[in-house]
Image (cartoon, grey):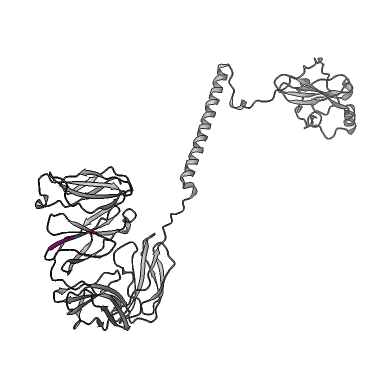
Amino acid sequence: GTAIDVRFVPLSREQQNDAGINYRLTYRPQGPGSGWSGVTIGTTGSYRLTGLIQQTRYELQLLPINNVGGGVQATDIIIVTTGTSPPSTAPSNVVAYVTGVDRVKLTWTKVVIPTSTRATRAVAVGYRVSFWTYDNSIALTRNFGDVNSADITGLSRYNNYNFRINAFTEGGDGPFSSTVSKYTNLPVPDTVSNLVASEPVKSRIVVQWIAPTVSNGAIIRYKVNYTMLDIEGDPAAYISNTTAAAETLFTFYNMKTGIYQFTVTPQNANGYGVPRTVQYQAQGIGPSAPTNLKADNILTTSLDLTWQAAENPTEGFIIQHKLLASTSPHQNTSVLLGPTVRTYTVNGLEAATTYAMHVVALSGNIFSLPSNQVNVTTRSVTAPQTPFYQETWFIALASSVGGLIVILILVCFIRSGRKRNTQKSAGRYVAHHEAEKKPDVPPLPDDEPEEEVKRPPLPEESHYSDDHFRHSDVEVDSLDSMDQYADLPHLSKFNEDGSFIGEYGELKAARSQADVNSFMGDYSDVRYDGAASYHGGNSYAPTLRSSRPGSPASTINPNNSAFSTFV
């Protein structure tokens, strides 16, 4: 980006004229007011100039020097732009023609810059021709544009000149071509002009031209060569023909369908002159080219092609393809298809790849011209859909939540353990079933002291077989608890409302209704006064009070069973 590589051919020993030969390179940024800078670069023939400004155009000139001083002639000024790359290849097929005793015409094939490098390497903006009269002498240069031929004039007759060519860009000069030599004597004709080809009748091609303006003598004949180009534009072997005399027309018969390249070269007494070439696409003998080629149903590895044809070829059709970015020739995609086929499915393609495709017809072993070309890009492979639970984000989220839950559980266990340790140190341990605090129960009121009641004997009219009891023998104010009659049989049986089943257990059905009515009538006015009596343990029960003496009383037996009784 900030350096320029300089190459040159040093002077021969004869041209140095004195000792101390060296070379002075002068340079400056292009533009008004820019001063020249210089550096002595030695005699090796190459030098790297550094410390320049990036993306800047510089003018460079080389001057030989010795002990006496600077030379009388410097090189032509060349222009180089920093920050860009020069061409990487040299022109090829360089040919020199002596078209006069003081001139030489040079022709060459241009440099080809690969597509992949065009983004960083500029296209050649011109060609530089270097020439000299003998080896190791300083060369003269002539600059030309983006052309493939040039006339070098002002030469001296009867001298042997050497020529070489290089392409250049604003990034500098590319490599040199091979050197060609020519002796300036016996000039040959220059090239013809207005060369054209036509097909007035199918399979008949007529080539015409105008004689060269510089013939260097009478034209004896013209050599007319032709070749057929393949689909990629590469020529096959040339077929040579010559005119009978100096006529400027030549007709070819029974030409097959295809693309031809015709070259016409004039000849005089000194030899053949400078050739000129033209290309022509002929219908010729053979099937018509298919038309309207289309691509449909484009998938990752396949696609469908359809086309039309003005006539059915005698043998059929062939699909051909290549990678669009490739310089390789087309290859057959299909086998020979039938003459009536107009559609074909291409398989075995690569995904996300661009192809160039066409179809050709075949009749009598003659291929037609290719159809229109279609450029098709296959689809990309779609990645399979991953379930959300296999996605990285979901796995990370689930792991985070799970880890958080584990941490919370550990925190709860740690806090619970600390609480137990604290309670143990305080002298109290809380069991698991006491974890939830129960509401406080208010203390029960103190029971009133009960008078000791003497149990009277059971009446004689009792229906029990072992004891006898009669209501009339019981005093009204004689109230006693169940404890006083604990020895009576079946006394523990009682109803859900607290009354005894069958009064004192299993009463016989023969008891008179009058006794029952009398019994119930004496104690029907029992009511609950809301007071409670507490006897040991943790149980308590309501106390039944009567509005008159002889009402039922409530007590709690030693086994904490609450019930009511009548006395």
**Residue 561 sits in quarter:** top right
Residue 83 in the image: state x and y as whole percent: 31, 49
**Residue 214 sits in quarter:** bottom left
In this picture, which residue range is highlighted in magenta?
142-163
Residue 153 belongs to the span the image colors magenta = yes
Q: Is residue 387 above or below residue 558?
A: below
Q: Nearer the viewer, residue 427 or 307?
A: 307
**Residue 119 sits in quarter:** bottom left
Q: Which residue is found at the position 69% from the left and 25% from the top?
A: 439
Residue 197 in the image: state x and y as whole percent: 29, 78
Q: Nearer the viewer, residue 479 or 399?
A: 399
Residue 505 in the image: state x and y as whole percent: 78, 30
Left/right placement of residue 113 relative to residue 481 reads left
Give the quarter of the figure containing the C terminus.
Answer: top right
Left/right placement of residue 69 relative to residue 311 reads left
* Residue 459 shows up from this direction: no
Residue 293 in the image: state x and y as whole percent: 40, 72
Q: Which residue is found at the position 46% from the left and 51% from the top?
A: 386
Q: Is residue 293 above or below residue 6?
A: below
Residue 395 belongs to the span the image colors magenta = no
* Residue 205 shows up from this direction: yes
Q: Nearer the viewer, residue 224 or 464?
A: 224
Q: Is residue 330 above or below residue 313?
A: above
Left/right placement of residue 509 relative to residue 378 reads right
Left/right placement of residue 237 relative to residue 501 reads left
